[in-house]
Image (cartoon, rainbow, N blue to C red):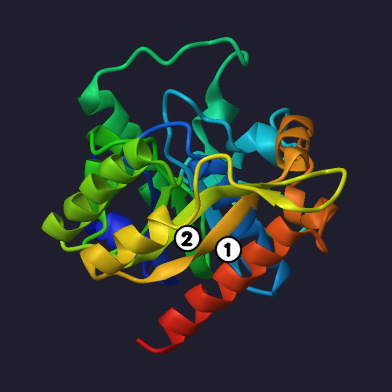
Amino acid sequence: MYSEMKLQENLKKTKHKISILSGKGGVGKSTVAANLALKLSMNGKKVGLLDADIHGPNIPKMLGIEKEKLGGDGKTIQPVTVASGLKVMSMGFLLESKDTPVIWRGPMKMKVIQQFLEDVAWGDLDYLIMDLPPGTGDEPLSIAQLIPKSSAIIVTTPQDVALLDSRKAVSFARKLNMNIMGIIENMSGLICPYCGKKIDLFKVGGGENAAKDLGVRFLGRVPIDPRIVETGDSGKPFIASYPESKSAKAFDEIVKKIEEIVKAK
């Protein structure tokens, strides 16, 4: 049974709660969420990563922990911890197999998200990063209602179709009184694996222009690197595998901006 007091008590030691949103699927939102959370933890921060995509929980595979099991004492759930100290909770840990679908309506999804927030032993955290499914449906709405005045980062790609939906995500966050930290432009050009030059596959700059139009911060752009796909599929986080790459350095700069924003509060 949902208890607002219990939820607030469980999260009171979490300093910053940040939802990673996108207006549409396919923009690399989970990849961005996983790498941001991991980078923050590698920087010495205490970080939790909540995979709130109930129907498509991909975070465990991306971090190479899909075979891990949750612990608990009957009252609390112990999240899975990766080498950097990052604490992770996902519906993926609760499924019988990777092929098991979650066939739930809205109320069931809201209930499990409540449980992830109330019953998981997050402990003391500097950041709780929440990877939400695309769009403005049940899961993003649940998080916004359960954690009033939490922060939001919107992930988009440069092409017009993605930008149209990302603008809706910004409007969604504003209507629910979320603190919009800014927009990240993902897949911003392809880094050629042979010559190292950038190819503008999906155009460049659309995310920055949208941020200016909407009056929100532009946090940075992350170029496409074919190795991001390889590391995500193999469970070896990209920023840890290729820290000197342009894409990893882009994540570094975005994390610096996030830390500057929270320090200025």
SS at mark 1?
strand
Could you say which is closer to the camera, residue 120 or residue 168?
168
From where the camera sits, is residue 19 visible?
no
Residue lying at 12% horizontally and 56% vertically, measured from the top left: 175
- Left or right: 169 as drawn, with respect to 91: left
Marks 1 & 2, CB-CB < 8 Å contact: yes
Residue 7's disc is none
Residue 128's disc is 2
From where the camera sits, is residue 104 visible?
yes
Residue 47's disc is 1
SS at mark 2?
strand
Residue lying at 40% horizontally and 89% vertically, measured from the top left: 264
Q: CA distance from mark 1 to mark 2?
A: 6 Å
Q: Is disc 2 surrounded by few (<14), some (14 to 19) or many (20+) residues within 10 Å?
A: many
Q: Residue furthest bottom?
A: 264
Quadrant of the rendered image containing residue 180: bottom left
- Where residue 247 appears, as percent x and y from the top left, is 69, 56
